[in-house]
Image: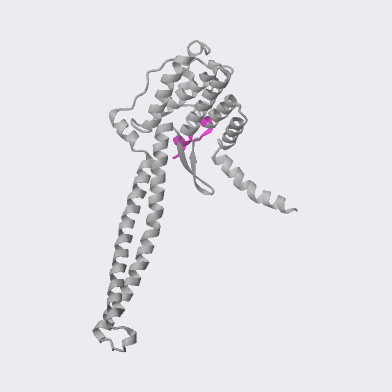
Amino acid sequence: MTLSTVLWAALLPQVSAETAAEPWRPLEAECYRRADAGDYAAAGDACRRAFEAVPDGPHAFDQRSLFAFKAVRFYKRARGAQGDVALLCPAVAVLHTFEAQLGALPAGERAADRTDVADELRTLEPQITDACGENSMDDLLDVQGPSNGLKSDLPTRNDPPVGRPVPAVRPPPQADAQAKRRPLRIAGGTALGAGLGLGTVAIAMLARAADMQAQVDGLSAMYPVASGVKIPAADAQRFDNAMVRGEQADRLAIGFGVPAIGLVLSGVALLAIDAHRGRTGRRVALHPGPGGIRFRMEF
């Protein structure tokens, strides 16, 4: 048995388990592969099927949001490249399906997604008038189908249903406030605040170390070694105490300063990503896996 065979036999159970837990993963790979090849319509289809394949779970809507809007983005690119407005029909279809899923959640939850879906529909639906088939989209809004809550027979690009105008779903006033409290902003603000707090402590320790060093220098000047003057016991004790406390303050300054720098940089990075996401509509998904928590951002 060769080494490659042994490695494959060891890795196969893990790969199979991950694929079973995340059935959308092969479709996601196909989506990226098609997009890299410039076949944006096929990439949109693959992302739409990945959206459909996401099972229920604590991070289901993070993944569905990522795939739904990525599919829409690829369909829009395909329409721009080919000039065929009918390519927007499946984009509207997946938006309506995701809209229905969001409607089953408590009011105000996923407010940013609700707003983005409504904005996309308001932009795309007027463009597909008379461009799609005559079928109603009611069957696309059936959220009581498979276990993952999504209808398994989403229309293909070649036979899409027409997008029936639906009133835009606007979040309630309290949802607008919740939309501003994005996870990345909260995490970034928390990290930045903790980093600044630790930095303040580190600066205080540096100031204390400098004060102790000043005391040591003063005593050394009073009793220079070359003079041969004997240091009184009280001053000798002060010298030793100042040395010990100064060294402790230096260690504490380093101990607080290093994580402070890391937290401040992390907080600034998270806030920058959140601000950029707010401007571009990119999406972030965090989900657990065999190798730990994975961070995924839509570009």
Residue 212: x, y in percent?
29, 71
Residue 93: x, y in percent?
49, 21
Residue 3: x, y in percent?
72, 54
Q: Is residue 59 magenta?
A: yes
> Considering depth in this image, is 228 or 267 the residue closer to the camera?
228
- Residue at image x 28%, y 69%? 211
* Residue sticking out furthest to the left: 234
Please give left or right for residue 246 compared with residue 62 in the image: left
Q: Quadrant of residue 96?
A: top left
Q: How is the image coloured?
A: one colour
- Residue at image x 41%, y 49%? 266
Looking at the image, is 85 positioned above or below residue 242? above
> Considering depth in this image, is 276 or 216 the residue closer to the camera?
216
Which stretch did the figure color magenta? Answer: 51-63
Q: Quadrant of residue 107?
A: top left
* Residue sticking out furthest to the front: 227
Residue 242: x, y in percent?
29, 75
- Total marks placed: 0
Looking at the image, is 230 positioned above or below residue 38? below
Q: Quadrant of residue 189?
A: top left
Looking at the image, is 59 positioned above or below residue 153? below
Please give left or right for residue 112 compared with residue 138 in the image: left
> Considering depth in this image, is 182 or 106 the residue closer to the camera?
182
Q: Is residue 2 magenta?
A: no
